[in-house]
Image (tube, helix red, strand yellow):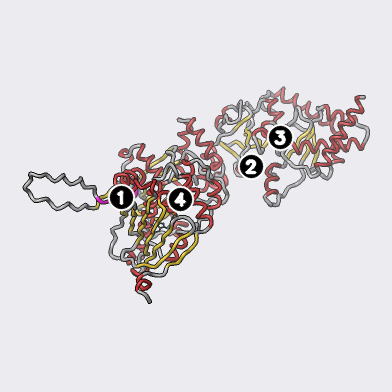
Amino acid sequence: MSEQSQSSAPQEQMNFQAEVSQLMKLMIHSLYSNPEIFLRELISNASDACDKLRFEAIANEQLLENNSDLRIQVACDEEAKTITVTDNGIGMNREEVINNIGTIAKSGTKQFLESLTGDQKTDSQLIGQFGVGFYSAFVVADKVELSTRRAGDSSDAGVKWTSDGTGGFTLESIEKADRGTQIVLHLKDDHKDFAGAWRLRSVIKKYSDHITFPIMMLEQLPPPPPPSEDSEEPEEPPKEAQLEQVNAASALWTRQKSQVKDDEYEEFYKQVFSDYEAPLMWTHNRVEGTQEYTSLLYIPKKAPFDLYDASNQRNGIKLFVQRVFIMDEAEKLMPRYLRFVRGLVDSNDLPLNVSREILQDSKVIDSIRRASVKKLLSMLESMAEKEPEKYSEFWVEFGQCLKEAPGEDFANKDQVAKLYRFDTTQNAKVGELTSLDDYIARMKPGQEKLYYITADSYTAASNSPHLEIFKDKGIEVLLMHDRVDEWMMSYLNEYEGKSFVSVAKGDLDLSGIGLDDAEKAAEDKAKEEKAEQAEPLIARIKAILEKETSDVRASTRLTSSPACIVLGEHEMALHMQQLMKQAGHEVPGSQPILEVNPSHPILTMLDEEQDEDQFASWSRLLLDQALLAEGGQLEDSAGFVKRMNEMFMALHQRST
Ligand code: ADP
């Protein structure tokens, strides 16, 4: 065996997962004008590694290897064009290196790749959201060496990972006396100025000031004075540079509210939650008494792109116990419908070794959650009141999330509903929104119900034939056209003691609204007479449509359309039934009710039709067009077209 092979451990060459290569290319491209992000990402990983060690050491003190002084060190070498980031955190074993650095374990990768926009600002934020931070090293480096050893493992269990960021990486076993991870970046020529101490310091101050572990760099010594010729004194030996701390490392939330400036809150948010935009709002609270905790909760300005994906189970709350970071995404701390809130809770009452399982039924967590929700809801309420424009911004981004509340948070149903905003028939244009309180304030004398319609678009809602009688009587109707609305309304039965009624479902009784007793009596009488007169016609239609409908009746809703579809009070709207069917769900449903408008000329024409075949054909046409207007789908669309063409022909024949 040669000496050479004895001293160097065998190297193993491995390939990146295909997605990693793709990702790296995209990232290098998208971070082109913001390359300094790499340092934030590496320091954030180093800080996470220290957090993990501190947390694991609570149960197993030996992991600390007699050194509990956790820190991060950044160094550079201008000549060699290298930057070195070192931490004494948890480190990684061989298997972890392979799994964490070289594959992307996160499930959303494909989605991430699809979501890159080409816009640098947005993309660099997405990169933070997806935690692919390590690879940003290749934005500035053409070679990266990562040496690491897991805390608690023996010193010969070190691993060195090396890659040029193209096809793959090599792994070799190394001796590593200190636990933790060291990353050496060999800078590309066009980024070699990062290997300057001033530059690094300013990048650290800018992006990593809040990191709670000290980030150390060698102090910068003034250049030695030029040797003076006439000096007799012996030259002093050069001073040795000491390590000094670069970041402030203060946990911002532990400070008094009055001592923290707005831009500090904003910077903290941007750094900790990787957002390039300042938050819309925040609330910082210290609670003392039976429970002691601090919460700092932010509402972002923009919704993340995957907020409404069913697969997105993320939650933005970090849990600390006595300043020690415990976990990300503490889902028990925030209900699903507030999943867009970012922030942290630092409790003094929970044990340091708390786990997700313990959180599941922790009374402490329950009460923090209840109080945090209340705080957020009242903050939104006062924003809506005092800063309506800002509130509209919020509503556009996150309103659909809040609409999930009635199904999830029964206790706060009314308080959340107060925050809702809707289009209505009274508003001049789409997007000019109304609160339920405004709606109630505008209700007609005698009106006791809150009327609404759901549809799959604003246009479909605002043009629905179901609104005719309401327009006629000047009764306002809420136009709901978000996908979640139908679902929300199945939980939201009333607001301020007034029940919601869908204008497209069940029997409609508008009698009495806006009329005095005499007028009401006259209206009732006229209605009865009309219905009586229409009876024979309706019986004829009913006989034809016996299979397709559960009932045919004279309408109280229509004034200008000939017919419309009405659903049972508890049935799902047709456009939703359609969606559910497309998604492969079974939709229990009975046949719809057809309501006809006996005063309409088409109905008069039908009444006069002697040819029974023609009558049957026209009746079917009436049903089909009512289904279409309702967003339903025809089972026999070819039959519909055929009947329509026949009608054109018949009209033509009659007119010649
Ligand atoms: P993220 O940090 O968001 O998970 P990264 O790509 O930056 O994504 O890192 C991938 C994983 O590699 C981390 O989750 C962590 O497990 C591991 N890792 C990265 N840097 C370090 C480090 N300095 N010490 C220990 N583990 C690390």
Q: From this viewpoint, which residue is outermost toward the front? A: 229
Q: Position of residue 402 (x, y in %)?
A: 54, 42
Label 1, residues with CA under 10 Å away: few <14, some 14-19, many ≥20: some
Label 2, label 3: how many angstroms apart (C-alpha)? 19 Å
Which quadrant of the figure has residue 417?
top right
Q: Is residue 312 visible?
A: yes
Q: Is residue 375 visible?
A: no
Q: Position of residue 345 (x, y in %)?
A: 40, 49
For mark 4, what is the residue?
333
For mark 1, what is the residue?
78
- Tell me if label 3 and label 4 are in contact, CB under 8 Å: no
Please report whichever mark, 1 or 4, sits nearer to the chain's N-terminal start.
1
Please report whichever mark, 3 or 4, sits nearer to the chain's N-terminal start.
4
Q: Position of residue 132 (x, y in %)?
A: 46, 52
Label 4, residues with CA under 10 Å away: few <14, some 14-19, many ≥20: many
Q: Which mark is residue 482?
A: none
Q: Looking at the image, which residue is at 88% across and 28% down?
A: 651
Give the structural element (helix, strand or loop) at label 3: loop
Q: Position of residue 547 (x, y in %)?
A: 83, 45
Discs 1/4, front: 1
Is ligand 1 less than 8 Å from the beta carbon at label 2? no
In depth, the one of 307 and 498 nearer the eye is 307
Q: Which mark is residue 486?
A: 2
Q: How many marks?
A: 4
**Which three-letter amino acid code belongs to the residue tagged 2?**
Glu
Discs 1/3, front: 1
